[in-house]
Amino acid sequence: MPFPNLAGRPSSYTDESIEKVGEFAALELEAGNLPTRAGLANHIGITKDTLIKWGNEHKHLFDALKAFDQLQENQVWQKALNGEYNSNIAKLMLHNHGYSDRTQTDNLNKNVDVPVDEDLKPEEQLQDVLKRIKELQGAKN
């Protein structure tokens, strides 16, 4: 026996959903709260997964969500810089906006023993060391 509705129930998305993004952000900011996607989904009456799905399917909602995310990012920065947010919480929240506290290191700063010719004057020793370092760098490339 065939299944009559394989596509699932119809989407409840409407263009009104876009208006609710701005409405919710304004309400949260007015109340002194940080607007979140989870709160927005609750305001619309859907799950956060559905909100993300709709954003991927509807360009205008996608654009509204990007603006919403930028607003949230800016609020986190401002509140963190003013000392209103715990720095660990702010760091965690900003991670969701692409920030990281990792530092990238390279291997060019390794200590390398370069023998120094003691018979040379100090400025000649420096020139000799610089020449050898260049040679080492050239060998790596």
Image: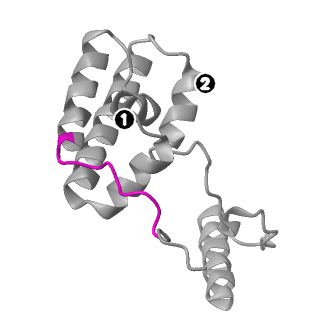
Magenta-span inclusion, residue 8: yes
Position of 27 with respect to 3 (left or right) is left
Numbered circle sitting on residue 88:
2
The picture places residue 45, in percent across and down from the top left corner, at 39, 33
Where is residue 22 shown, x and y percent of the image?
Answer: 20, 32
- Kind of residue sitting beneath label 1: Glu
Q: What residue type is labelled 2?
A: Asn
Pick whichever, 106 or 73, lies toward us: 73
Q: Where is residue 91 in the image (x, y as percent from the top left)?
A: 55, 32
- Expressed as whole percent of the image width and height from the top left, the position of residue 12 reads 32, 48
Q: Which of marks 1 and 2 is in front?
A: 1
Along the viewing direction, whichever of 42 and 108 lies nearer the viewer: 42
Label 1's element? helix
Q: Look at 30% across and 45% down and name the residue there.
A: 65
Cα distance, mark 1 to mark 2? 15 Å
Magenta stretch: dominant secondary structure: loop
- In the rendered image, the quadrant that contains the C terminus is bottom right
Q: Report the magenta residues as a range.
A: 7-16
Quarter of the figure that contains the N terminus: bottom right
The secondary structure type at the circle numbered 2 is helix
Residue at numbered disc 1: 73
Q: Residue at x 82, y 69 (%)?
A: 113
Q: Can residue 121 be seen in this view?
A: no
N-term-proximal mark, 1 vs 2:
1
